[in-house]
Amino acid sequence: MTEPDRLLSSAGPSRRSLLFSGAAALLGSALATPALAQGDWPAGRLITWVVPYPPGGSTDVLGRNVAQRIGAALSTNVIVDNKAGATGTIGAAFVAKAAPDGYTLLGTSIGPQAIAPHLMGKLPYDHITAFEPVVIIGTIPHILVVGPNQPFKTVADLLAAAKAQPGKLAFASGGNGTILQMQGELLQQQTGARFIHVPYRGDTPALQDTLAEQVQFMFAPAAAALPHVQAGKLRALAVTSAQRLKALPDVPTMGEVGMKDFVVEQWQAVFAPAKTPAAVVQRLNQEINKALKDPAVVALADKLGVTLVGGTPKQLGDLQKADSAKWAKVIKDGNIKAE
């Protein structure tokens, strides 16, 4: 007779009931453990991929394609839920408060995760500690462009004119607090030049007024600016990536024209709520990395001007922290306020 059998046979009714109750409680506890701990996540349950922007932008379009593929890989459905507003922080707040069970994800960009929190005062979450980094989707370089009739042939020309006429030259951006504004502010702080910032309601109208030469220059997303540069409707003075762009081999980087530490790329990435199990984060990371190698996703990214990256959760976490510190300093030193 085994030890458990001996205990049960020698126990009275009360003791026997107690032992069975204890065993049942232990079994119930094991069954109550989330399916993800059993290796069954997502167990056919719906996963929500929150995009903190309106439909149609590159973060949304690329996110939908990646979400579709990881849904197929995980034998479930991944739906995209657009929760736009407040420079992306409304959607981020929703995910920060979600259960850390792997069923709510945030497909976002540098703005809400590294810039906006330093402009908007106190948010209902911490943009670093409220999330588990999953993976970098990709990066978008920018091009410093001027209209074709502007007299500036180089970045040095632009800076010389700005220093000769402080506060006279204007640059456009897609709005207050955007990465496009931050680059103009960084240029001022690194060079001592002074410009007028003209914010627009989105990158498109900002680019249109740069084309119309209502403003002198703009840091524009590469995909949006490139066709106009190639058509001669805009002049490219420099690119903000670490390396020259294949499509513009003759255009120098900001580093090459003397702007130290001026590598600025708008990244897109996926986060989960803090305390999401490591096994779930790793599985998501694995499947998204696979999706980023899909030829259809690669072709779409090329069309959108996104350089696909992938990598580990730690690489995303390190990037977010570094960029958060970088833009916090720019915002503080420039006394930049959200409007």
Image (cartoon, grey):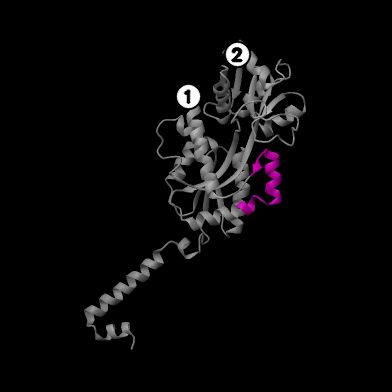
Q: Position of residue 34 (x, y in %)?
A: 43, 61
Q: Position of residue 307 (x, y in %)?
A: 66, 41
Q: Nearer the viewer, residue 38 or 84?
A: 38
| Mark nearer the N terminus (2 vs 1) | 2
Residue 3 quadrant: bottom left
Q: Position of residue 194 (x, y in %)?
A: 56, 16
**According to the image, label 1 marks what residue?**
333
Query: What crowding class fits label 2: few (fewer than 14 Cα within 10 Å), some (14-19), or many (20 or more)?
Result: some
Decide if residue 68 is on the left or right side of residue 338.
Answer: right
Q: Nearer the viewer, residue 127 or 242?
A: 242
Q: Amino acid at mark 1?
A: Asp
Magenta-drawn stretch contains 302 = yes
Tell me which residue sits at (60%, 22%) in the image. Answer: 172
Q: Position of residue 265 (x, y in %)?
A: 60, 35
Find the magenta span and give its range. 289-308
**According to the image, label 2 marks what residue?**
163
Residue sticking out furthest to the right: 231
Tell me which residue sits at (36%, 68%) in the image. Answer: 28
